[in-house]
Image (spheres, grey):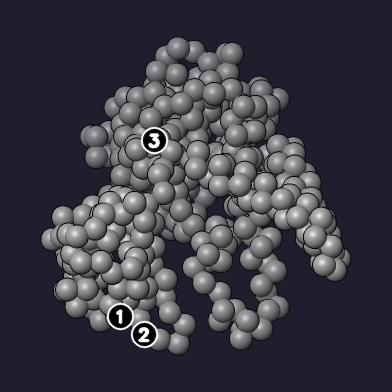
Amino acid sequence: MHSAAIVGTGLIGTSVALALRAGGIVTHLVDADPAAARTAEALGAGTTERPDGVVDLAVLAVPPTQVAPVLASLQKDGVARFYTDVAGVKALPGREAEALGCDLASMVGGHPLAGGERSGPLTARADLFEGRPWVLVPSEATSTAALNCALELVASCGATSVLLDAEAHDRAMALVSHAPHLLCSLAAARLVDVDQSVLRLARHGLRDFTRLAGGSPALWADVLAANAGPVAAVLEAFAADVLEAACSLRELARSRGDTDVRVRGGDRLSTSLERGVAGRSGIPGPYGVPEPAHPAVEVDVGDSRGELARLFADVAAVGCDIEDLDLEHSTGRRVGRVRVFVVRGRAHHLAGELRLRGWEVTGPPSYPVGGFCDR
């Protein structure tokens, strides 16, 4: 692959272009909004000039419902030898492309599992896809040459190829992405009319749970509509679980001291919570395996410039690797609480060392430096 056309210069499209440019591939930028394309050009993602001839690959970074019509238009103009897209839904675009008479031999559906809450070319970066899965969905008509070109694209972006059929992809996305996003949005929507005095009680758990609700409503409405059936199935299963939990709680509320009822209701809730722990423990961590639970050292950090960097430097000086990090801003105070997750066996040692360096550490309990290990 020597040349590519990137159609759509938002976060994903511009990031693809930046990654390809870093590999020496000539990229041509196209967007319905010329200003977005010019912004991507200014970032070094390519050129807004039309290609002199046919490019090797056209990457369609457009919403799911736009994939088929854009593909048909590009193929009519003979823009590229091969085509792929990055939409988060695959079955609907495939059916619509076939209905429009598109050349499916030159098309490979694609979906890089990377991104963020913010959109637009200014949020793009060349390393966005490094080490991330990139699903490719070839149809029965897809040629070997087209698939090889798509595989080369994925490798050029530093991602890992995963081959799936369209229906399997959409069911998976409904479970791990689309339905969770909608659930986060529904939870956040319950907060709209809540008094600020109540919201001041919110901690990082609520912020984490509702973080996804900050995504573009227009974009997500399009994605959810395109994958409506699988998402509805996940929501129906979730609704059944929610109703079961609600029934258990209602039973507990009416127990009026009946020990048997309280035990029975408590057992049902405990089972649900235990299944939640088991489900979360299977989510792969940064190295592709289930992430172990790490103890946290909680440190109060002021908002002075450089304080967070100083904390990181002290953690490194102690000889600890940070496995994960969580930052919570305090309400009404110019201070934040940083939870530094480290490997088991190092938390108490790190806490003691940080206290000696003048940090206000609130967990775990203090032990003599070097004298104890976590059990």
Q: Amino acid at mark 1?
A: Asp
- Category of crowding for the residue at label 3, using alpha-carbon neighbours closer than 10 angstroms: few (below 14), some (14–19), many (at least 20): few
Residue 103, given in percent of the width and then of the height, sits at: 57, 20
Q: What residue type is disc 3 on?
A: Gly
Q: Residue at x 31, y 44 (%)?
A: 127
Mark 2 neighbour class, 10 Å CA radius: few under 14, some 14 to 19, many 20 or more: few
Residue identifier under label 2: 334
Q: Which mark is residue 167?
A: none
Compute the Cα span from label 2 to label 3. Answer: 37 Å
Task: Using the image, determine if residue 159 lies above or below residue 225.
Answer: above
Which residue is at the front of the view, 97 or 80?
97
* Residue named by callout 1: 303
Dots 2, 3 in contact, CB < 8 A = no
298 left or right of 142 in image: left
Pick the front one: 36 or 17 = 17
Task: Determine the residue positioned at 40% across, 86% down.
Answer: 333
How dense is the environment of label 1, judged by Cα within 10 Å: few (below 14), some, or many (20 and up)? few
Does 48 appear above or below 184? above
Labels 1 and 2: the sequence-earlier one: 1
Disc 2 is placed on an element classified as loop
CA distance for labels 1 and 3: 34 Å
The residue to which callout 3 is attached is: 288
Residue at position x 56%, y 74% in the image: 202
Left or right? Give the position of 268 relative to 370. right
How many numbered discs?
3
Dot 2 or dot 3: first in sequence order is 3
Residue 347 place in picture, x, y as percent: 29, 58
To which quarter of the image does residue 253 belong?
A: bottom right
Q: Amino acid at mark 2?
A: Arg
Residue at 18% x, 64% y: name it. Answer: 369
In the rendered structure, which disc, 1 or 3, sits on the residue that comes first in sequence? 3
